[in-house]
Image (spheres, grey):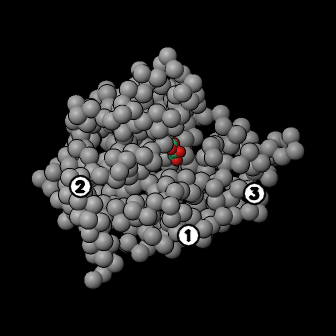
Amino acid sequence: MDRREFIYRSALTGALLSGTASGLRAEAIKKTGLAEVYKDSFKLGTAMSTKTLSGKNPSMLPLIAKEFNAITAENAMKWSAIHPGYDHWIWDLCDQFVKFGSENSMLMIGHTLVWHKQTPSSVFMNKGKLTSRKKLLKLLGNHISTVVDRYKNYVAVWDVVNEAFDEEIGWRKSSWYNVLGPDYLSQSFEIASEADPTAHLIYNDFKLENKKKQRFAIQQIRTLKKKGVRVDGIGLQCHVELNPNKPTIEQLEETIINFHKEGLQVHITELDVDVLPNAWGYRDQHINDLPERAGKLNPYKDGLPERVSTLLASRYEELFRLFIKHQDKIPRVSLWGTSDDETWRNYRPVVGRTNYPLLFDSRQQPKKAYFALHKLGTDS
Ligand code: GLA
């Protein structure tokens, strides 16, 4: 019995022993995981949480091993997690990540080398002074080459730079940009390429279907390419809403086609579907501190109504129909997590809501959306 088979069998035994209806329902789909169903179209990935990587969610490992063949670390490889101080590196969780990926023959995606968030403030400011251009370039180079070099035999795809552009103003005025200007994008790709010439290098961002942002991103990528800087792919995060207009399938399709025309492979990097009302106006507040809004902003705290669960399944289905249609351009589709209890959507933008954006519920049981995708993949 190989390892995969062993994991599958132990999970199956667990489900049967639990004796519940959902356990049996899960058992019914055990034979073929989603990744297997989509294997002729694209890799199917998920993000692994810090909880899972630190061994605190053991049942998640066999589930991921069966359902997915690509992994991204949700937070563990971000600068502040892996490199919290100048000479301070924390490798354990990422070492676990590559161990798990290797044992299960998965495509591993490194996320993310350069971002304005989840980066220690000491990178940009020291003793009340802004880091100089020279020093910041040195820090950038050291960070990228150290991380890429350590994992070069494992990680095949890197989200080199995350979210450098803004929908309205072009360059996001982040600390990276404020000190280094546009150079930080080209430098990051150059250093990553030097550190691992065979890795596939991606620029990753959200809402690239926004016309202004898309045009700007394309311009910048063209500029890099003209300078001889290698960019292999675009990452469309795809944190979409249940509302079929946000974004529409047509907008996404045009985005996929436009980036592909630039010679880029198109990765769907962080897919999830927000089923809750838009709450960005209450960003970072706790739902308990919004008592008069709680009913409206957090309507499904006791469970997802069947009607919404069906809508979620259709939204996932239309998205996957599109991805299947453009499978020649899309090497990988990654969900941003596996089960609803672990989603970032429960604490962003408002903390403490109950969201349902993924394919497995908070008990790690497959949802209607899972079955819809399973059927779609099997039939196509
Ligand atoms: C962005 C980042 C991800 C993650 C999400 C929220 O999309 O790229 O790493 O932080 O925000 O979880």
Secondary element at image label 1: helix
Confirm or deny contact between disc 2 and disc 1 (CB under 8 A).
no
Q: Is residue 235 visible?
A: no
Q: Which residue is mark 2?
A: 20
Choose between 267 and 337: the one closer to the eye. 337
Q: Which residue is mark 1?
A: 95
| Label 3 – label 1 distance at C-alpha | 19 Å
* Residue furthest to the bottom: 1
Q: Position of residue 109 (x, y in %)?
A: 47, 60
What's under tag 3, amino acid-wise? Gly
Q: Please name the residue shown 43% across and 64% down the image.
A: 58
**Front position among marks 2 and 1:** 2
Which residue does the image show at 31% across and 27% down from the upper left? 243
Residue 365 location, x and y as percent?
A: 29, 52
Q: Which amino acid, mark 2?
A: Thr
Distance (Cα) linking label 3 and label 2: 48 Å
Query: Secondary structure beneath disc 3?
Result: loop
Which of the two marks, 3 or 2, is nearer to us in this view? 2
Would residue 124 be found to the left or right of residue 170 on screen?
A: right
Which residue is labeled 3 in the image?
Answer: 85
